[in-house]
Image (tube, grey):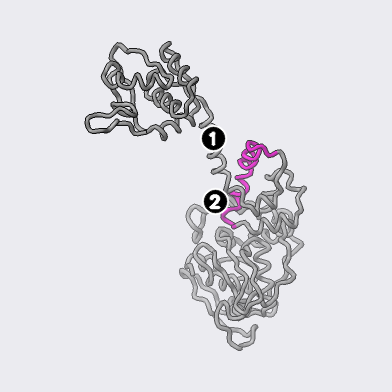
């Protein structure tokens, strides 16, 4: 349990003491980042001093407004519960009294599909802790330690007969708008540093506006796919749309990928790698100019000899002898470096080039006799087949 999250839950204005007690129980079970929430309905109901029906309805409300996201639905086993994670950023913003009503209003326009099959088997009894036999609505008194000097009266922690009500459907339009303006409020006491700079939580409507022709998709499938996206990646999913569309066009795909498939395939995660691969492919296909008799020129000459490209070998020598460059693909030059290896510099009029000249000529590279003071680049002092006193031809490829 995180003390910071517990403090935020204590200060949350949810319009109902039962909601607050359920929220405190969930925070008590989760990790610092809001993950790994496996609540048992019976345990939640006991600790929140409400009925199991109310606990179930409250969890659904939290999912509807985006405070919770169902990561995995529980099975029929006794200890198999629904797996949730919490939007921590949203939790800290619930300290503002007007925020919960605004979230309720926003949920009316962006509802998640109800799971009518949810029952007690998906919140197995005992999964969140031991359950005693006390009546579910019996008053327990103050079961929560105040955080950082905050105080709640015992009456504030008791549950009255008017338990949580269903989401209101009569809120004003201005309250709906405030649900999407969370980034405008300055950081206040108890909120993490830098919270004011964080963008408001992304919504399904944000995605619909950004994804091409999202209105043509099957909306129930789109909502289900959106619900599977972790809170921390929802803006990344939206921000990655332009790059994904560009990469898809660059790859030659003319058709449109549906919004549900984009989300369920987490395609925004692949965009950087796809862009990098395409950039490498483009770079490998780009042509570079190589000056005659340079180190790169000798690398390409030897690589073409290794490949038996006699026509290109002869052309390379003619261009260099005329003082002209040759154009090669960057990928071919990279491959030549890997294939031939490191070349050694020798004097242009030294015994090394004299030893190599006949071998190169036999391969189609008629190297002229050089004059001047520059270097030639060769794999070794002797060509393949020529042995020195130690029996080594000095060639590394």
Task: Assign a secondary structure to mark 1.
Answer: helix
Q: Marks 2 and 1, Cα distance to the nearest angstrom?
A: 37 Å
Q: Using residue 65 as the reference point, say whether residue 358 is left or right of it.
A: left
**In terms of depth relative to the viewer, which is nearer, 193 or 122?**
122
| Residue at 40 percent of width and 20 percent of height | 362
- Placement of the C terminus among the 4 image quadrants: top left
Q: Are marks 2 and 1 in contact (CB under 8 Å)?
A: no
Q: Is residue 237 magenta?
A: yes
**In terms of depth relative to the viewer, which is nearer, 146 or 223?**
223
Q: Is residue 335 magenta?
A: no
Please provide percent x and percent y for residue 302. 41, 26
Q: Which of marks 2 and 1 is in front?
A: 1
Residue 281 is labelled as 1
Residue 158 seen in the current view: no
Q: Name the magenta segment's main secondary structure.
A: helix
Instruction: Kindly identify which residue carries mark 2.
Output: 198
| Residue at 31 percent of width and 20 percent of height | 353
Question: Which region shows up in magenta?
Answer: 230-253
**In terms of depth relative to the viewer, which is nearer, 228 or 291?**
291
Q: Using residue 177 as the reference point, say whether residue 311 is left or right of it.
A: left
């Amino acid at each position: 349990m995180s003390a910071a999250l517990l403090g935020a839950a204590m200060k949350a204005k949810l319009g109902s003491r039962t909601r607050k007690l359920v929220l405190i129980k969930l925070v008590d079970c989760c990790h610092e980042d809001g993950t790994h929430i496996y609540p048992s309905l019976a345990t939640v109901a006991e600790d929140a001093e409400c009925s199991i029906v109310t606990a179930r309805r409250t969890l659904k409300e939290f999912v509807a407004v985006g405070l919770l996201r169902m990561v995995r639905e529980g099975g029929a086993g006794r200890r198999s519960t629904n797996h949730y994670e919490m939007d921590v950023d949203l939790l800290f913003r619930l300290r503002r009294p007007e925020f919960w009503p605004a979230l309720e209003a926003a949920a009316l326009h962006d509802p998640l599909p109800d799971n009518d099959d949810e029952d007690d088997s998906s919140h197995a009894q005992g999964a969140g802790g031991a359950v005693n036999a006390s009546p579910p609505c019996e008053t327990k008194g103050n079961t929560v330690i105040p955080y950082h000097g905050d105080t709640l009266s015992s009456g504030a922690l008791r549950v009255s007969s008017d338990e949580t009500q269903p989401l209101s459907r009569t809120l004003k339009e201005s309250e709906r708008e405030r649900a999407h303006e969370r980034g405008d409020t300055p950081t206040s006491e108890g909120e993490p540093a830098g919270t004011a700079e964080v963008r408001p939580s992304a919504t399904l409507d944000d995605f619909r506006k950004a994804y091409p022709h999202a209105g043509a998709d099957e909306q129930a499938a789109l909502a289900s796919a959106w619900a599977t996206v972790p809170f921390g990646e929802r803006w990344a999913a939206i921000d990655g749309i332009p790059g994904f569309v560009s990469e898809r066009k660059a790859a030659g795909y003319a058709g449109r990928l549906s919004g549900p498939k984009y989300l369920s395939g987490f395609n925004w995660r692949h965009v950087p790698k796809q862009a990098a691969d395409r950039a490498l492919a483009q770079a490998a296909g780009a042509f570079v100019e190589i000056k005659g008799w340079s180190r790169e020129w000798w690398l390409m000459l030897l690589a073409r000899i290794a490949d038996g490209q006699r026509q290109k070998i002869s052309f390379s020598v003619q261009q260099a002898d005329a003082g002209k460059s040759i154009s090669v693909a960057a990928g071919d030059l990279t491959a030549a470096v890997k294939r031939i290896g490191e070349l050694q510099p020798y004097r242009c009029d030294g015994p090394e080039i004299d030893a190599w000249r006949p071998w190169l000529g036999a391969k189609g590279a008629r190297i002229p006799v050089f004059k001047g003071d520059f270097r030639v680049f060769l794999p070794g002092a002797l060509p393949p087949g020529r042995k020195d006193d130690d029996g080594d031809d000095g060639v590394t490829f």
